[in-house]
Image (tube, rainbow, N blue to C red):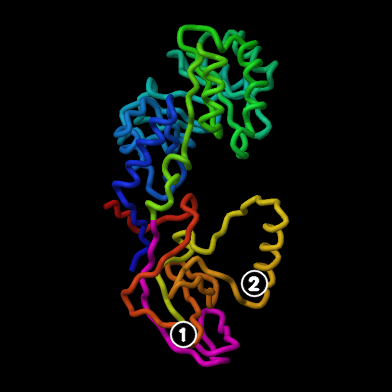
Amino acid sequence: MSLVLHVDGDRWRSHLRAVAEARPGLVPVIKGNGYGFGLGRLARKSGWLGADVVAVGTPSELTEVANRYDGDLLVLTPWRAFEPLPADVDRRRLIHTVDRLEDLEALAATGDRPRVVLELITSMKRHGFTPRGLREAVRSEAGQRVRVEGASLHLPLGPAGGNLAEVETLMTEVVAAGLAAGTAPAVWVSHLSTNDVATLTTRYPEIRFRQRIGTELWLGDRGALRVSAHVLDSHPVERGEVFGYRGRTLARSGTILIVSGGTAHGIGLESPTGESSARARVSTLARGGLDALGLSKSPFTVAGKSRYFAEPPHMQASMLFLPSEAPVPEIGDTVDVRVRFTATTFDAVEIS
């Protein structure tokens, strides 16, 4: 009675090794729901890969990762005084992201020369110092009372090579701030192709580019991953017969199929895609029209076809409609499920 992530272990591990080899300076990203695998599992796998540092999203994720991984821990969310750090994590392992002078000053005041990376704002416009602010931070008194581990650049998603021009511009600001000097200068980057990084390494041989990789690493070979749900029950229904929480009816006869997986797992909670193409807009309009008719495509595949929800998914199960001509699976059979891994909580993860 479970929603299960099945992993072809050999294929997945081979993919992880290939990414690690292609991405020198790899910093595995372990955040949120652990990309569907769970934080602890990815922490252990990062150690297996030989990573000397991993990145977590928020301080609240530190304990679970730190207990299963021995290296350093970069926190991607910028440091804020109101966000407590877990007491059970060795502060010497932590690398804080800082993007405001007042936070740098407050963090420096905690003593023991905390480790930091200074984030420079990019076209993402999410976090970061302005170029002038970055220079001021490096030269400030507070900047002398912390251990600066380099600059951080969080770039937007884009086509291969789409971020190189922006990074080259930003690198002039990193150099101007003095962050390309020292014994081991580093720039922490995301969303760059291997060719982009190779180009930057050639142009700035004195700098180590630390590549923060999440989706490409953990989810980059979708062929190694499969999600299944159990068939829990089935009931024949006639046209116009009432069913479900909301007393709905259907315009044709068929079968109501009950499968494992509901809103508690993330089923039916679709995140905005942000796609802006004409095709994407047409698809959105089409889905909206089907929703208005009470027909909403589910992520469940039965007998080779994606099936409609009979009604909105319940907390731990979903009701699907199968037309009368469709074969009905047996109770206990499994069906494939298409999910967004970063928004799905599985009952079990089975690695072969």
Check the image and report above or below for 20 versus 134.
below
Residue drawn at x 39%, y 58% as measured from the top left: 226
Check the image and report above or below for 318 versus 90.
below
Name, please, the residue furthest toward the right. 278
User: What distance separates the C-alpha of mark 1 from that of mark 2?
Assistant: 20 Å
Rendered image quadrant of residue 200:
top right
Q: Amino acid at mark 1?
A: Thr
Name, please, the residue furthest toward the left. 352
Q: Position of residue 29 (x, y in %)?
A: 45, 36
N-term-proximal mark, 1 vs 2: 1
Q: Secondary structure at mark 2?
A: helix
Extent of the magenta region: 226-254
User: Is-magenta flag for residue 236?
Assistant: yes
Q: Is residue 163 visible?
A: yes
Q: Is residue 82 visible?
A: no
Rendered image quadrant of residue 100:
top right
Q: Secondary structure at mark 1?
A: strand
User: Is-magenta flag for residue 307?
Assistant: no
Q: Position of residue 302 (x, y in %)?
A: 44, 73
Q: Amino acid at mark 2?
A: Asp
**Residue identifier under label 1:** 255
Q: Position of residue 137 (x, y in %)?
A: 62, 14
Nearer to us in this view, 243 or 6 = 6
Q: Which mark is residue 279?
A: none
Nearer to us in this view, 158 or 32 = 158
Q: Position of residue 110 (x, y in %)?
A: 48, 17
Residue drawn at x 30%, y 54% as measured from the top left: 350
Instruction: Please tell me how crowded label 2 is: few (under 14), some (14-19), or many (20+) other residues with Cα within 10 Å.
Output: few
Instruction: Please tell me how crowded label 1 is: few (under 14), some (14-19), or many (20+) other residues with Cα within 10 Å.
Output: many
Q: Is residue 351 left or right of residue 213?
A: left
**Residue identifier under label 2:** 291
